[in-house]
């Protein structure tokens, strides 16, 4: 990551982490808040609705909150350098597919994984392959808004189109 402290991370990431564990009055309000975000709303689909149903915890008072444990995310961020990820890359033995979302969240250059970082990662992992999706962002790359990511995964796994289960 190009930042070292929470204060240096992109505003969208800080906002995403801040919402974790924060109760919202109802599921409908929770959904509406997320659907109003410019990096989610235009790509909203039935899969996102299904994802949200599983992402939330319903509280006794009728409010909801994300099931993701905020403190765990914050600790992982604080301690990321302890894992020394760059030192681990060359030890990876399995073929590796890196899907990179190239669209920014609020600005063109606020991706979670920069182009340079993705290329460095792939250069150091034996048998790694990078596939970029310039029109997708950190969220939309996994929500089935375009067929490209699933096709790339199928191709990487060696399955012919249509012979593998739908991703």
Image (cartoon, rainbow, N blue to C red):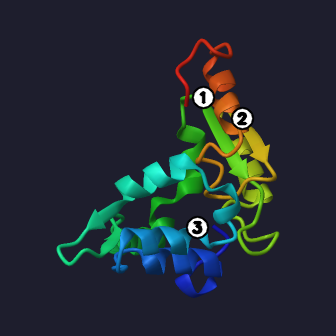
Dot 2 crowding, Cα within 10 Å, few <14, some 14–19, many 20+: some
Horizontally, is 76 left or right of 143 in the view?
left
Question: CB under 8 Å between callouts 1 and 2?
Answer: yes
Disc ID at residue 95: 1
Q: Earlier in the sequence, mark 3 or mark 2?
A: 3
The secondary structure type at the circle numbered 2 is strand
Image quarter hosting the N terminus: bottom right
Q: Secondary structure at mark 3?
A: helix
Q: Residue at x 34, y 63 (%)?
A: 56
State the residue at coordinates (58%, 74%).
Answer: 13
Q: Is residue 13 left or right of residue 98?
A: left
Q: Tell me how far mark 1 sits from mark 3, CA to CA.
A: 36 Å
Residue 26: image x %, image y %? 36, 74
**Residue 98, placed above or below residue 16:** above
Q: CA distance from mark 3 to mark 2?
A: 32 Å
- Seen at 69% across and 22% down, the residue is 155
- Label 3: which residue? 35
Q: Which mark is residue 129?
A: 2
**Which corner quadrant of the image does residue 128 belong to?**
top right
């Amino acid at each position: 990551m190009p930042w070292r402290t929470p204060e240096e991370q992109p505003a969208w990431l800080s906002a995403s982490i801040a919402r974790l564990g924060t109760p919202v009055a109802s599921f409908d309000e929770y959904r509406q808040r997320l659907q109003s975000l410019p990096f989610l709303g235009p790509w909203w689909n039935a899969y996102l609705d299904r994802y949200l149903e599983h992402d939330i915890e319903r509280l006794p008072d009728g409010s909801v909150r994300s099931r993701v444990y905020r403190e765990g995310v914050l600790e992982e961020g604080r301690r990321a350098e302890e894992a020394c990820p760059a030192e681990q890359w060359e030890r990876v033995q399995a073929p590796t597919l890196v899907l990179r979302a190239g669209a920014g969240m609020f600005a063109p250059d606020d991706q979670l994984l920069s182009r340079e970082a993705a290329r460095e990662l792939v250069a150091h992992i034996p048998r790694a392959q990078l596939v970029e999706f310039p029109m997708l962002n950190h969220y939309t790359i996994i929500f089935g808004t375009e067929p490209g990511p699933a096709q790339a995964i199928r191709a990487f796994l060696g399955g012919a189109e249509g012979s593998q289960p739908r991703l």
